[in-house]
Image: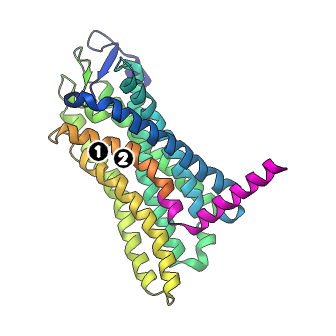
Amino acid sequence: FWNSMKHANESYPEYFILMGLTRYLWLDRPLFFVLLTSYLLTLSGNTAIILVSQLDSQLQSPMYFFLTSLSFLDLCFTTTTVPQMLLNLGGPSKSITYMGCMVQAFVFHWLGCAECVLLGVMALDRYVALCQPLRYSVIMDHKLCSQLSSTAWLLGLANSLLQSTLTFQLPLCGNQALDHFFCELPGLIRMACGNTTVNVAVLAVVATFLIVGPLSMILVSYGYIARAVFRIPSAAGRLRAFNTCSSHLLVVSLFYGPGIYIYMQPSGDDPQDLSKVLTLFYCVITPMANPFIYTLRNTEVKGAVRRLLRKTASSKRV
């Protein structure tokens, strides 16, 4: 893999020009401020979720273990692309080195695939919690949670290794203009000057597996969850279960919706500007929204945040 990344001859440029929204250059400055604000909110919100989940003893459950994993994944996911986009949108240069582009594309797809799988694992956790409540702590012990979280990371890594190795071997014939805000594999495949049939087919098959597989797990889990929720005798119990699950479903919709549109159509037949905007949505807006979705609809997290703020204020007074 790394040898293929280092291999650079006359067909590989020293750097790429990231075109962004070439027909709407006047949007660069407003987009810079939107991305900067979103990134700062992503950093603060996800860091707060991680700190609260780790420091509050009442949040030491599998659900918050996976929520912490999701927040850490979102921090890494946005940091892979947003700083480079801010540099390009706010400065005169819109370039990225060849090696930087390859690394960015590799890490971006690694973390994106890992998040797909992790969201499926979180649905499985909710299924066990609501359909097997008496055995929940026994089934979802720390060892299993760690194994499931590690599986998400490893599947993402394996997919990115496969896709990146195939993509980085494509001849570019000196092409430097990448029609996107950052480096991602479908864009690199489109700018290749060789036969990309194998790359397009592999990307479509693997994307289908990694999207449809976890999504099927989510739909099946929530089918059983819905049946279990309607059997809860108290209205308050049903509402609490609904609020917990609806937060996860909203996150799934925000992440999977754009991903399905983009990666189930890797041949480039979709409108490029729409594809770029949707990519920005799920790699910038969704990670920013996740902490707010989980905190605003979760009384336990809101209570933990208040306790942490009170403890911090008390320590400062002392």
Circles 2 and 1: CB distance less than 8 Å?
A: yes
The CA span between labels 2 and 1 is 6 Å
Q: Secondary structure at mark 1?
A: helix
Residue 271, quarter of picture = top left
Residue 2, quarter of picture = top left
Kind of residue sitting beneath label 1 = Leu
Which residue is at the front of the view, 120 or 178?
Answer: 178
Marks counted in the figure total 2
Vertical comparison of 90 with 271: above or below: above
Seen from this angle, which residue lies furthest right?
318
Question: Which residue is under mark 2?
Answer: 282
Kind of residue sitting beneath label 2 = Tyr
User: From which residue to which does the magenta span run?
Assistant: 293-318
Which residue is at the front of the view, 92 or 205?
Answer: 92
List x then y, in percent, for residue 237.
52, 82
**What label sits on residue 278 in the rendered view?**
1
Seen from this angle, which residue lies furthest left?
269
Q: Secondary structure at mark 2?
A: helix
Residue 166, quarter of picture = top left
List x then y, in percent, for residue 198.
22, 35
The majority secondary structure of the magenta stretch comes to helix
Image quadrant holding the N terminus, namely: top left
Inspect this view and state whether residue 139 appears. Answer: yes
Vertical comparison of 167 with 61: above or below: above
